Amino acid sequence: MTTPETGNRNDALPVVSVRDLSITFPTADGDVHAVKNLSFEVAQGGALGVVGESGSGKSVTSLALMGLHRGTRARISGEIRIAGTDVVTADDRTIRAMRGNDIAMVFQDPMSSLHPQYTIGNQLVEAYLTHRPGAGKAEARRRAVEVLDRVGIPEPARRINSYPHEFSGGMRQRVLIAMGLVCEPKVLLADEPTTALDVTVQAQILDLLDELRRDLGMALILVSHDLAVVAGSVDEVLVMRKGEAVERGDVRRVLGSPQHPYTRQLLAAVPRVEVTRAQRRAQLRAEREGRPVPVAAEPPRPAGQTGEEPLLVVRDVRQRFRIRGGLFGSSTDFYAVDGVSFDLYRGETLGVVGESGSGKSTLSRMVMRLLEPTEGSIVFQGRDITHLPERKMRPLRRDIQMVFQNPYSSLNPRMTVGESIGAPLRIQGERNSKLIRSRVQELLERVGLEPSHYNRFPHAFSGGQRQRIAIARALILRPKLVICDEPVSALDVSTQDQVLRLLAELQEDFDLTLIFVAHDLAVVRQISDRVLVMCKGKIVETGDSDEVYENPQHPYTRQLLAAAPVLDPDEARAHRAERARLRGGQPQAEAV
Amino acid sequence: MLRYILRRLGASVVLLLVVTLMTFVIFYVVPRLAGRTTEQLATMYVGRAPTEAAIQATIQRLNLDQPLVLQFWEFVKGIVVGAEYTFGNDVVQCSAPCFGYSFQTYQEVFPAILDRLPVTFSLGLGAAVLWLLGGVAVGVVSAVKKGSIFDRISMGLALAAVSLPIFFTGQLALAFLVHDWDLFPNARYTPFTEDPVAWASGLMLPWLTLAFLHAAQYARQTRAGMLETMGEDYIRTARAKGLKESRVILKHALRPALTPILTIFGLDVGMVLGGAVLTEQVYSLNGIGRYAVTAIVQSDLPVILGVTLFGAFFIVLCNLAVDLLYPLVDPRVRAAR
C-alpha cells in the first residue's frame, strides 16, 4: 500500500488511509470542488505534513478525517479509513466512538477552542468518560492530571480547576493537546496548531508534538501553511494547491529538490533567518528591474552615521498600567514598557522583536501617541510630543501612520475600501471629493489592487489584499514614519512574502522611515537595518541587524533565534536539540 | 467579591433614589410647570367634594405649600423613617415605608400593597417558570432544527405572540379554553396555604396567557443565541471529542446562549412582580397591577406613587440578583472585575 517514492520505513498497516477523496460544496453558483482526488496514508507512528495556503483544501480534509463534515453541506466521495473505521460510510455512533479515541484533533486557535465557561478539568474529564464510560470520576481526574503533566502544564493538580481564560495562548494549546491525548489515540491531527502563537511558543508546541509522537508511538498529521513549520517534525510532506496534491514525498526530498513549481514557489516565500538585509534588498531590486540577482551584495547603509538629525528620538519611556488587585482592591503597578530608548534616522527601518507581552505593541502605540508615556520623552522631528494634547497632536498625525496586525478587524466592514483609505484625508481637512477619489485610486493601483475596487467592501478581499488596503490607508497622507505592528503575522507565508515585497518597494518610492514590529525573526531581519530585541518591557539587545543575527549576545536573543523555524529538516532537528539544551537549565514553570 | 457585592448594592440604592426623584418630579413638578396653582393641585387630589377645608388639609398633608426640595425631602423621609399625618384633630402614625394614604379609601398604601402581593407573586413567578422553560425549549429545538417545519411554525407563532396584546389573547383564552371547551376553570385566586390544587388550577389560565407573551421573546432570543454559539470553535472541539450531539447542544452550546437570557429574565421577573397590569385586569385578579389601574383611574396619587416605586424596587432587586449571579454563570466576568 505504501507508494515506493515515500521511502517509508514502516511496513505496518497504515492507521490513516485516504483514497481518491473528493469534497464538494454545492453553492448557488455551482459546485465548489474543495478537494479533488486526494490520496495519502500515514503509517502507525508516522508523521505527515500537509502544506498549502488558505483555500488549498487542507482544513476541509482535516475535518473530513474526523468525520466533522457531517451535518454540513459538504458532499464527499472516495474512501477515508482511520484505524479500521470507514469514515465515509460508518454510522454516527461509530464515528463518535472514533473521535477522540482513535484520532484526536488540535485546532488552530487555542483562544477560542476551549469552552470559556467550564474548567479545563471538566472538559478533560468529559473527554475521558465519553470513551471510558466504565471509569469513575476519580479515575478520569487522575488521568486528566497525568496528561496535563505530560504536556508540561506546571502544577497540574491545582491548575486542573482553572478556567481557560486563566491560561496564556501557548498553555491553552497544551491543554488542547492534553485533551487529545487523554484517550491515547492512534493519530493526532494538528491543524495549524501554532499559527496563532509566537515563534518561541510555536517551537515549544512543535517540540512537544514531536516528543509525544515518539514517546507514545502516535501517528501525527501536521497541517500548516508554512513549510518551515513542518520541516523538522514530519517524515513525509504533502503539498496541496486548490484541492489537489501537487507533490508528495519524503520531507528531505521535497524540501531539498522540489519537483513541482508550486512547491518551489512556496519554498521561496518562506522568510529565512540566514538571508541578510543587503542580500534581500539586492534580490528585490534586481527582480524589480528584471535583472538577474547580482552575486555581490551592496554595502550596508550608513544609517545615522552622517551626523544628520534623527527623525525620532525616544528616551527612557515607560508605560505604566494599573492592575486592580484582589479582595481589598489594592492595585499594583505594571510597566509594559520599562525604560526604552532609541534613535531613528530618516529612511531607516527599525525592527522591534519580542514575544507577546514583551511590550512591543505598547511601545508602538506610545510612538503613535495613542498612549501617553508615563515617563520619558518622545521627540519627533525635533518637537517633543510626549505629552502633546490630542488637539495639537492631530496635525502631526499626518506624518506618523500605522498598519495594524489584524487585517480582518482593522477595516470598518461597513465602509467601502475607498472611503476607508480616503478617510484620513477627509479628517485632515480635504474637502474635494474628486481629488480624494483620484488620490485613493492612484494608491490602490500602487499597492497592487484595481482602482475599480474603490466601491467594494472589505469582506470581498482576502487577508493579503486587506493588508494592502491598510497599507494604502497609512500612506494616503504621505507620512514620514510608518509603524507596522505585526503586519504579516496573520497571513500565509506566500501572501506574507508579497506584502513584505510591497513594503520594501513603497519604502523606496515614498522615502519612508519604518518601525517594523514582529515576533518573527526572519521577517524582521529581511526588512530591518537595525533591530531592538525586547523582553518584559526592556531592550535586551540592540544593534545592526546582521550583527544581532550572526552574533547574538544576550541569551534571550539566542533563545529566539533557536526557536525560528528552518527549512532544512536536519538543521531543524539540531535546533530542537539546542532548544532542549537551553530549556534544560530552566524550571518548567517558565515554559509558556 | 465582597467589594463587588457592596459596589452593586450601593449602585442599586442610588438607582432607587433616582427613580424616586423622577417619579416625584412627574407627579409634583410637571403639573406646576403646566401652570397649575397649589390650590388646583390640591383640588385634584381631594376627590369629588372639594371643600375649602379639605383642600387646605391636603396642602398640609402633601406639603404642597413648601419649597420643592423640602417636599421631596419629606417624601423620602416618609419612605425611610415613616411620617405623621394630621386629619383634623387626629394625628395618625404612618410607619416606614410610608407612601401615605389613599385619597379614596383612606387606607395606608403600603399595607394595601402587601395585601395584594401574594396574588401578584403567585401569578408572576408561576408564569416566569412556564415562559422560561417553554421559551428556551422551543428556542433550542428551533435552532437545532433550523429551517424545519417546527422552526417555521414556532417562530411564526412567536412573532404573533409578541405582537398580540394580552387583553386580546386573554379574551380569546377565556372564550375558547374556559367557555367553549371547558378545559380550565375561570381564573380565581386561592391562597396556596389554603388549597394548593385550587391555587394552581385557578391561576393556570393567567399563567398561560402571561407566559405565552414572554415565552415568544425567549424562544426567539434562545434560538438566535444558540445559532451563534453552535458556530463557535469550542463546539467543534466538543464534537471532535466524540460527544453525543445532545450533550454538545445541552452542555456546550446552551450555557453560553443562556447567559444573555439571564439578563432579560431578571428584568422581566422584576417587571411582573411590580404588577402584571393587563393580566390582572383581564382576569380580575386583585393584585398590585389592578390596584395601580384603579388608582390611576381615580387619580389616587399616593397609591400611584407607591405602586410605581414598589415596581421599581423589584426591577432593581432582580437586576441586582442577576449581577450577583453573573460571575457564577460566566467565570470570565470574575476575572474582568
Image (tube, grey):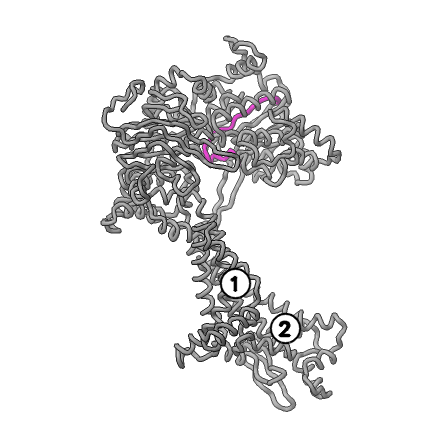
Q: Report the mark closest to the observer, 1 or 2.
A: 1
Which sits earlier in the primary sequence, circle 1 or circle 2?
2
Residue A89 point in image, percent of width and height: 32, 38
Chain to which mark 1 belongs: B
Name the kind of residue labelled 1 in the image.
Leu
Classify residue B253 as left or right of residue B87: left
**B77 or A409: nearer the eye?**
A409
Residue at mark 1 shares a chain with residue at mark 2: yes
Q: Which residue of the protein is positioned furthest toward the bottom in this rendering?
A: B89
Name the kind of residue labelled 2 in the image.
Trp
**A229 or B236: nearer the eye?**
B236
**What is the span of residues highlighted in magenta in the rendered image?**
A346-361
Chain to which mark 2 belongs: B
| Crowd class of label 1 (few under 14; some 14 to 19; many from 20; radius 10 Å) | some
Splitting the image into 4 quarters, where does residue A155 fall? top left
Residue depicted at x 51% and y 63%: B214
Splitting the image into 4 quarters, where does residue A105 fall? top left
> Which image quarter holds the N terminus of chain A?
top left
Residue depicted at x 23% and y 24%: A11
| Crowd class of label 2 (few under 14; some 14 to 19; many from 20; radius 10 Å) | few
| Residue A268 against residue A370 in the figure, above or below | above
Residue A477 point in image, percent of width and height: 67, 30
**A34 or A379: nearer the eye?**
A34
Residue A382 point in image, percent of width and height: 66, 28
Residue underneath mark 2: B73
Residue underneath mark 1: B267
Q: CA distance from mark 1 to mark 2?
A: 29 Å
